[in-house]
């Protein structure tokens, strides 16, 4: 059996120092320029009927053709995504998403024409709100440290 060059405690202390030395180093912070990201929420009473998360869910359903895949890509539980879809479908005059049950042929989900229209309108309002606040944001940036 090979003889250890140092006591077990010393060995563990050295090993820990090597493994965790990166934790103690001060990280250099990179100064990023300030950015403005207006986020719209359509409120119905106290509840948000539509916002950035639900819009992203609708877009991903359109891309993937699947509620489960869209939920996974968002890091969301399938049942949570399904509850959002049900809430959206109840809130609007016609459904925003149609779903097909699984089985041998496989299931799926897709935004309806109304769903695509809602997403396009939301994105347009988002762009217009962003453009509307640019002048004020330039004034705001002048107040920030370089």
Image (cartoon, helix red, strand yellow):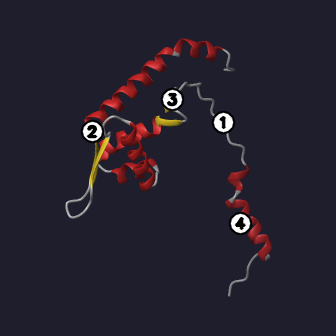
SS for dot 1 = loop
User: Nearer the observer, disc 1 or disc 2?
Assistant: 2
Whole-angstrom CA distance, mark 4 to mark 3, is 48 Å
Instruction: Tell me which label, 3 or 1, sits earlier in the chain.
Output: 1
Mark 4 in CB contact with mark 3 (< 8 angstroms): no
Whole-angstrom CA distance, mark 3 to mark 2, is 24 Å
The numbered mark at residue 39 is 3
Whole-angstrom CA distance, mark 1 to mark 2, is 45 Å
| Residues packed near mark 3 inside 10 Å, few (<14), some (14 to 19) or many (20 plus) | few
Q: Position of residue 99 (x, y in %)?
A: 28, 50
| 51 shown above or below 100 | above
Whole-angstrom CA distance, mark 3 to mark 1, is 27 Å
Query: Which residue is denoted by mark 2 in the rendering?
Result: 112
The numbered mark at residue 15 is 4
Residue 6 in view, yes or no: no
SS for dot 4 = helix
SS for dot 3 = loop
Q: Identify the residue shown where x is 21% and y is 64%.
A: 104
Instruction: Tell me which label, 2 or 4, sits earlier in the chain.
Output: 4
Residue 10 in view, yes or no: yes
Instruction: Tell me which label, 1 or 2, sits earlier in the chain.
Output: 1
The numbered mark at residue 65 is none
User: Nearer the observer, disc 3 or disc 1?
Assistant: 3
């Amino acid at each position: 059996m090979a003889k250890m060059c140092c006591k077990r405690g010393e060995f563990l202390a050295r090993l820990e120092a090597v493994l965790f030395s990166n934790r103690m180093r001060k990280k250099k912070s990179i100064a990023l320029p300030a950015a403005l990201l207006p986020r719209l929420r359509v409120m119905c009473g106290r509840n948000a009927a539509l916002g950035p998360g639900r819009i992203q869910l609708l877009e991903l359903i359109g891309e993937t053709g699947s509620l489960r895949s869209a939920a996974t890509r968002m890091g969301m539980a399938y049942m949570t995504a399904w509850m959002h879809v049900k809430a959206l479908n109840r809130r609007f005059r016609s459904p925003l998403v149609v779903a097909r049950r699984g089985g041998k042929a496989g299931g799926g989900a897709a935004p309806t024409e109304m769903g695509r229209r809602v997403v396009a309108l939301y994105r347009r309002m988002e762009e217009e709100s962003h453009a509307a606040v640019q002048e004020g944001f330039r004034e705001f940036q002048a107040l920030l440290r370089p």
